[in-house]
Image (cartoon, rainbow, N blue to C red):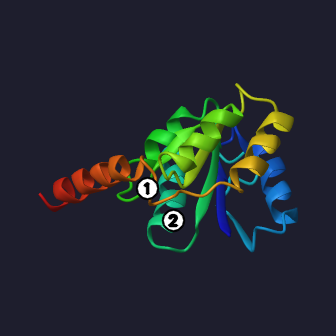
Amino acid sequence: MRIVVAADNAGVDLKNQVRDLLKADERVTEVTDLGVADAGDDRAYPVLGLAAAEQIARGEADRGVLVCGTGIGVAISANKVPGVRATVAHDSYSAERSVKSNNCQIITFGARVIGPELAKKIVTEWLGYEFDPESASASKVAHITDYEQTHLAS
């Protein structure tokens, strides 16, 4: 699995810890870190969230982990990219359902909301989930995709 990670300066420390965890996980073949490198880099979260989501939309990464102060801003930004579904998930059940029920490719965290050990636990679990295209949720995800494609064309 190819993972892209990114964070603004509010989330850089948590992003770096999650990135290092992902690099050590045997299920992950590649980790691309889009930054920021340190708290001195003041690039805004939308720039980073959009860049990560665009990599996923282009097929250059399979999933993404994004971090900002709350996780909300990077999720909103990533969701603006057609074909990408991102969600904040600060608990195991939400992380599981984000993939199994909603086929989300991106999980986001708020560094001011969640501690690093819980975030790492959730990411480790999240890597093991897969969307079932035969599930009861598949038609709902297809409805979202159809809407997006119809309105993208107009």
* 152 to the left or right of 17: left
* 25 to the left or right of 76: right
State the CA–CA distance, disc 2 to disc 1: 7 Å
Can residue 89 be seen here? The reply is no
The quarter holding residue 63 reads bottom right
Q: Mark 2 and mark 1 in contact? Answer it, CB < 8 Å.
A: yes
How far from the left and from the top, in percent, is residue 84?
43, 56
**For the N terminus, which image quadrant?**
bottom right
Amino acid type of the residue that numbered disc 1 sits on in the rendered structure: Val
Whether residue 18 is situated above or below residue 89 in the rendered picture: below
Few, some or many residues within 10 Å of mark 1 (<14, 14–19, 20+): some
The quarter holding residue 9 reads top right
Amino acid type of the residue that numbered disc 2 sits on in the rendered structure: Ile
Numbered circle sitting on residue 14: none
* 82 to the left or right of 128: left
Q: Which residue is mark 2?
A: 56
Q: Which residue is mark 1?
A: 84
* 134 to the left or right of 131: left
Residue located farthest toward the top when viewing the structure as drawn: 113
Q: Secondary structure at mark 1?
A: loop
Few, some or many residues within 10 Å of mark 2 (<14, 14–19, 20+): many
Residue at 23%, 59% (x, y): give it.
149
How far from the left and from the top, in percent, is residue 112?
71, 26
- In this rendering, the count of numbered labels is 2
Q: Secondary structure at mark 2?
A: helix
Residue at 51%, 59% (x, y): give it.
51
Residue located farthest toward the left when viewing the structure as drawn: 154
